[in-house]
């Protein structure tokens, strides 16, 4: 652990980020082009005093979650993120964990989508980050890690997860999830330990998954028309669109209202409701 170098590295990365790059107003009397320290603290959820102390080369060793938040706030590349963790004396988190690296370009797009629900997920359907409207529409991501954080895993092991979709749509989503998983597994090379372990676990726990997996259907889920049940707004019809990273391991999902339905007005109301009345 080298907190002195960590502080210098954080300052150098902060100096190159403009407020507009992370969705913040420039504001008056800005003497430097980069972010202020209090702005980085705001973006990462840290106290201002804590972040100032880090840049000075002191303070407590940052947690994995705090380092991931800093990497995202400062739009670090994968190499820069790895360097940040090394300076802090922390092992790199698994790529499929909620603290995993998020493609900076996807983060930029996500923060520009302030009027539509959007999230970045892995190809194994673990949510890495999502905006406020996605939390209002879909609920917060689980606090767990590993397999149990995957929506795909929970779809086949926790019946309550399916309540967000009408029962008559469940078969369609089951088929689509499994076909997409087979495509993702092939792109990983067919012998990826994370995907292989997930498939083995689901095959053992869910006869429904095992039967669907045996069909060998394959299809990347690039877009879909979905019906979602919101506890306050009722049924919404949305288009779910996907943008893939270069290696296919991450995707940006965003939801737009289906044209000609009352979901246009409902999604506008969602922005007003936020998460204040949301009941998981």
Image (spheres, rainbow, N blue to C red):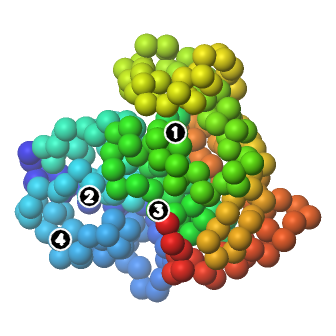
Q: Nearer the viewer, residue 25 or 155?
A: 155
Q: Nearer the viewer, residue 156 or 53?
A: 156
The label on residue 140 is: 3
Query: Residue 85 appears in which quarter of the rendering?
Result: top left
Mark 4 or mark 2: which is in front?
2
Please rate how many residues cluster around mark 4, counting C-alpha atoms within 10 Å: few if below 14, some from 14 to 19, many from 20: some
Question: How far apart are the alpha carbons under marks 3 and 4?
Answer: 26 Å
**Residues tagged 3 and 2 counted as in contact (Cβ below 8 A):** no
Please rate how many residues cluster around mark 1, counting C-alpha atoms within 10 Å: few if below 14, some from 14 to 19, many from 20: some
Q: Is residue 253 left or right of residue 258?
A: left
Instruction: Point out the tag, 1 or 4, that comes first from the N-terminus.
Output: 4
Picture layout, residue 74 above or below residue 274: above
Tell me what residue is drawn at x 49 percent, y 31 percent.
206
Mark 1 or mark 4: which is in front?
1
Question: How far apart are the alpha carbons under marks 3 and 2?
Answer: 18 Å
Mark 3 or mark 2: which is in front?
3
Picture layout, residue 260 above or below residue 223: below
Please rate how many residues cluster around mark 3, counting C-alpha atoms within 10 Å: few if below 14, some from 14 to 19, many from 20: some
Tell me what residue is drawn at x 79 percent, y 76 percent.
265
Furthest residue toward front:
207
Instruction: Point out the tag, 3 or 1, that comes first from the N-terminus.
Output: 3
Q: Please name the residue that numbered disc 4 is placed on.
A: 50
Q: Secondary structure at mark 1?
A: helix
Residue 213: x, y in percent? 59, 21
Please rate how many residues cluster around mark 2, counting C-alpha atoms within 10 Å: few if below 14, some from 14 to 19, many from 20: some
Question: How far apart are the alpha carbons under marks 3 and 1?
Answer: 19 Å
Question: How far apart are the alpha carbons under marks 1 and 4?
Answer: 42 Å
């Amino acid at each position: 652990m080298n907190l002195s170098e960590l502080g210098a590295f954080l300052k150098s990365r902060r100096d190159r980020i403009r407020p507009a790059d992370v969705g913040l107003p420039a504001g008056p009397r800005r003497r430097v082009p980069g972010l202020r320290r209090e702005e980085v603290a705001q973006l990462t959820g840290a106290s201002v005093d804590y972040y100032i102390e880090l840049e000075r080369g002191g303070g407590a060793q940052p947690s994995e979650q705090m380092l991931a938040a800093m990497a995202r706030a400062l739009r670090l590349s994968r190499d820069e993120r790895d360097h940040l963790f090394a300076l802090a004396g922390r092992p790199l988190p698994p790529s499929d964990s909620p603290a995993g690296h998020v493609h900076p370009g996807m983060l930029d797009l996500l923060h520009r989508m302030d009027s539509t629900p959007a999230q970045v997920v892995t190809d194994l359907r673990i949510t890495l980050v999502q905006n406020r409207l996605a939390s209002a529409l879909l609920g917060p991501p689980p606090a767990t890690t590993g397999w149990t954080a995957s929506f795909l895993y929970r779809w086949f092991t926790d019946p309550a997860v399916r309540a967000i979709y009408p029962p008559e749509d469940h078969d369609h989503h089951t088929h689509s999830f499994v076909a997409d998983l087979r495509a993702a597994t092939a792109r990983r090379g067919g012998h990826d330990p994370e995907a292989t372990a997930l498939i083995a676990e689901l095959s053992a726990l869910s006869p429904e998954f095992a039967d669907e997996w045996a069909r060998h259907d394959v299809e990347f889920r690039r877009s879909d028309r979905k019906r979602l049940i919101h506890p306050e707004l009722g049924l919404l019809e949305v288009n779910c669109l996907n943008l893939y990273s270069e290696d296919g391991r991450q995707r940006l999902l965003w939801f737009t209202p289906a044209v000609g339905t009352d979901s246009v007005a409902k999604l506008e109301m969602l922005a007003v409701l936020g998460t204040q009345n949301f009941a998981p």
